[in-house]
Amino acid sequence: MLNSLRNLKSRTRLALLALSAISLLSFSACNGLLGKLARKQVGVPQLLTPIRTADTSQLIAEVNRLAAVKSLHGKLDIQFQDTSFASAGIAEKYRSADADVTVQRPGKVYLIIQFALVDIAQMSSDGERFRVALLKGDEKYRKFVKGTNNANYGELKAEPVEGKTEKGKKPAPDAVSTLSNLRPQHLTDALLLKPILPPSESGLLYSQSEFFQEEPDTRAQAKKGARVVRSYYLLEEMGPGNAGELRLKRRIWFDRVSGIRLARVQTFDDRGTLDTDISYGNDKTLGEGPTARLPAQIELTRPKDQYKLSLMYQAPEAVVVDKEWDPEVFVLQNKWQLPEVDLDAQKVSGAKNSP
């Protein structure tokens, strides 16, 4: 009997030792597997480097360097995109046209848009009032429009062309109908950046922050569909609003990769709604007499006016920089005898007739 108990205890100890060994082996194997899982590489967008640093005074100095240019004259490739149906994921992009543009501070512009050497539209702003001559397209769009730069005429919408459409699509508007929403002074603000004045003169305040954004990799060597993370500084311009509140007026983006470069400017209305969104490409030297280092590609988006413009200088070296132009250059005359539309008169008439 005693021998039987001793044999049972011995077998029990051996069984426990075996279980312990199996447990240790299993734990070791699990640790090894977890280790392999923990060390597995996962693809994430690359953070672009080197990242430069700058303080608020340096960012303001860069804005004012760009804003030091007084005037520009040159030829552009210009492309329009109608975004009036963007909520359904549809946009109409029109063929690129040629443009001859002259801009001068403060707020002056003369623009001629051509396709196949034929004028499609001419536009001007003398800094206070704008004039737009729509020369081609459907008869209902051929007109001479006048208005005040700072007036609010409501959110304009391009009229669709009548006809059948496929389900889920809108009737394609005439390209000139999209042009009818374009206001020439918006081009001045895009091509000639507004300077930043001292707070004692402007009454505006500025706040700097850091921002990282995932976006498509646009570098020449990038693979198709590749994405990267780019670092930005945001310089926000704020002014007094209602009831002692601050109101965001302008947000200026600076690309920090390999330098400090103006990348984007957003402006906002009195309600804080996005008014204008302007993206800037890499800088190039414009001109051959007086020169300026400025963005050579610009994309202007007006969400409320439902259009987007893509602009690119055809010959940066041929751009005329800082010439003083006579004031009459920026006053378009209705030499075509087009039907005239005075938006200010319509606004007054509408106000009188409203209940």
Image (cartoon, grey):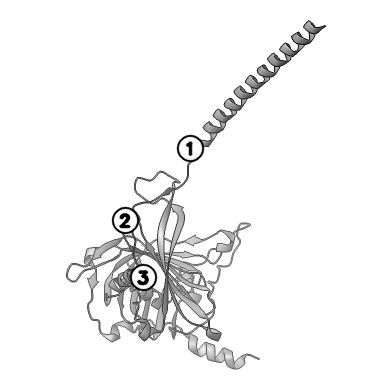
Q: Residues within 10 Å of mark 3 (few under 14, many from 20)?
A: some
Residue 134 visible? The answer is no
* Residue named by callout 1: 41
**Dot 3 amino acid type:** Thr
Q: Residue 233 sits in which quadrant?
A: bottom left
Q: Earlier in the sequence, mark 3 or mark 2?
A: 3
Closer-to-camera residue (312/220):
220
On the question of residue 76 being in view, the answer is: yes
Q: Please identify the quadrant where the N terminus is shown.
A: top right
- Left or right: where does residue 172 sit relative to residue 168? left
The residue at 47%/45% (across/down) is 44
User: Which image quadrant for residue 292?
Assistant: bottom left
N-term mark: 1 or 2 = 1
| Residue at 59%, 93% in the rendered image | 352
Looking at the image, which is closer to me, 38 or 256? 38
In this view, the mark in front (3 or 2): 3
The secondary structure type at the circle numbered 2 is loop
| Residue where numbered disc 2 is placed | 258
Separation of marks 1 and 2 at Cα, in angstroms: 27 Å
- Under tag 1, what secondary structure? loop
Quarter of the view holding residue 312: bottom left
Q: Which residue is mark 3?
A: 56
> Which amino acid does the dot numbered 2 rest on?
Ser
Q: Nearer the viewer, residue 48 or 170?
A: 48
User: Is the C terminus in the top left, top right, bottom left or bottom right quadrant?
Assistant: bottom right
Q: Real-space Cα distance between discs 1 and 3?
A: 38 Å
Mark positioned earlier in the residue sequence (1 or 3): 1
Give whichever of 100, 67 is nearer the camera.
67
Residue 217 position within the rendered picture, expressed as x and y whole percent measured from the top left: 41, 50
